[in-house]
Amino acid sequence: MGTRPVLVLLLGDIVRLRRPHPCGGKEWQIDRLGADVGLRCRTCRRHVLLERRVLENRISEFVERGDAEITAATSPGATPDL
């Protein structure tokens, strides 16, 4: 395993990835967390799953942060620290 810290992701985060989606959209909303992270394109509404490690490498910036309370409520064992 690498020494790099885990990136804190929240439900509802809007992220911009390094390359645009084929539809031309550049922003994605995170709607599922776990080993695989669910993303929904904000332009065409297509849903994809990416491994967390792959997503962490592809994120170029956070456009908008999600709600920590919703994330904690949906995954009781995890309490995200911001």
Image (spheres, rainbow, N blue to C red):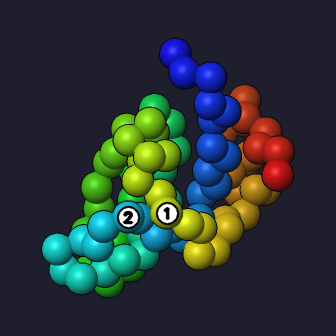
The quarter holding residue 5 reads top right
- Residue 12: tell me if it is visible: no
The residue type indicated by label 2 comes to Arg
Residue 18, label in figure? 2
Label 1 vs label 2: CA separation? 5 Å
Residue at image mark 1:
60
User: Which percent across, then down, holds residue 27?
Assistant: 42, 75
Looking at the image, can residue 52 be seen?
Answer: yes
Of 71 and 16, nearer the camera is 16
16 or 32, which is in the foreground? 16
In the image, what residue occupies the spot 72% across and 29% down? 77
| Crowd tier of the residue under label 2, counting other residues whose Cα lies within 10 Å: few below 14, some 14–19, many 20 or above | few
Answer above or below: position of 72 versus 19. above
Identify the residue shown where x is 67% and y is 46%: 8
Q: Position of residue 21 (x, y in %)?
A: 24, 71
Vertical placement of residue 59 versus 77, above or below: below
Check the image and report above or below for 35 versus 60. above
Whether pointer 1 and pointer 2 mark residues with C-beta atoms closer than 8 Å, the reply is yes
Q: Secondary structure at mark 1?
A: strand
Outermost left residue: 22
Q: Name which quarter of the figure residue 48 lies in.
A: bottom left
Q: Residue at x 55, y 21 (%)?
A: 2
Three-letter code, disc 1? Ser
The disc at residue 8 is none
Q: Secondary structure at mark 2?
A: loop
Q: Position of residue 34 (x, y in %)?
A: 50, 36
Within-10-Å neighbours for mark 1: few <14, some 14–19, many 20+: few
